[in-house]
Amino acid sequence: MTKPKFNNKPNKHLWVSRAVAVVGIVFAITLDGMKVLIAKRSDKMMDEAGKYGIPCGYLDWNETTFDGMTREVYEETSLYLPDHAYHLVTNNNKIPFTIHDSPANNRQNVSLLFLSVYNFSPRMDMFPVDIEQYTNEETSEVKWISLTDFYLKYDHEYEWAFNHNETIKEAVKHFNRIDSAKL
């Protein structure tokens, strides 16, 4: 029997391991069409400073991956997803729709991608456009952009952190699959 070989990297006291990152893609259905929530990373950020992206970060101690994603969306945009539960169309039962685990990724993070879709079209007065005024040490700008504008302009003209423009495209494909499955 052959003994399997693994890539564990021991150090003096602990094993070197990979970190878990959570990514929160938020779509909003509005009277003007589908929008996606993005944030510009502040110039103070260690990685990908000044670039646009989707709210994301590392999983904290004692939280589920969904709770971590909810926290990251709130910390980076001020949007608290549970406040809008009435408008929720899908959150994939709080399960990531995909996982990126390639060791070639930045810092070898294991990233869990969550998609939450909200329908504000019947109640546009409830659409949280006010979050576009939010900034903090991590975030210099928050925007709702239409998916049409994303494909026509933002995908090519903006600098994206962590290839998040490709992540948005993955989320669109996932949503189109689940939306067409309902029909």
Image (cartoon, rainbow, N blue to C red):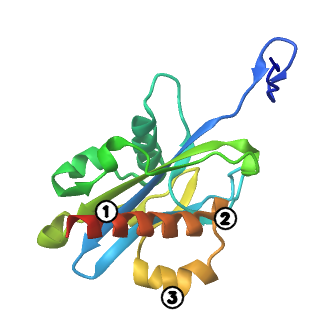
Residue 78 vs residue 126: left or right?
right
Residue that numbered label 3 is attached to: 152
Q: Amino acid at mark 1?
A: Ile
Q: Secondary structure at mark 1?
A: helix
Residue 8 is situated, as x and y percent measured from the top left of the image, at 80, 25
The mark nearer the N terminus, 3 or 1, is 3
Q: Secondary structure at mark 3?
A: helix
* Residue 141 vertical placement versus 156 (above, below): above
Are discs 3 and 1 less than 8 Å apart at CB? Answer: no
The C terminus lies in which quarter of the figure?
Answer: bottom left
Q: Which callout, 3 or 1, points to the residue nearer the camera? A: 1
Q: CA distance from mark 2 to mark 3?
A: 21 Å
Closest to the observer, 37 or 169: 169
Q: Label 1: how many residues lie within 10 Å, few (<14), some (14-19) or many (20+)?
A: few
Q: Amino acid at mark 3?
A: Leu
For the point 39% across and 51% down, the residue is 78
Q: CA distance from mark 3 to mark 1?
A: 24 Å
Q: Secondary structure at mark 2?
A: loop
Residue that numbered label 2 is attached to: 50
The mark nearer the N terminus, 2 or 1, is 2
Q: Label 2: how many residues lie within 10 Å, few (<14), some (14-19) or many (20+)?
A: many
Residue 37 is situated, as x and y percent measured from the top left of the image, at 42, 64
Asked which quadrant contains residue 43, the reply is bottom right
Residue that numbered label 1 is attached to: 178
For the point 65% across and 59% down, the residue is 162
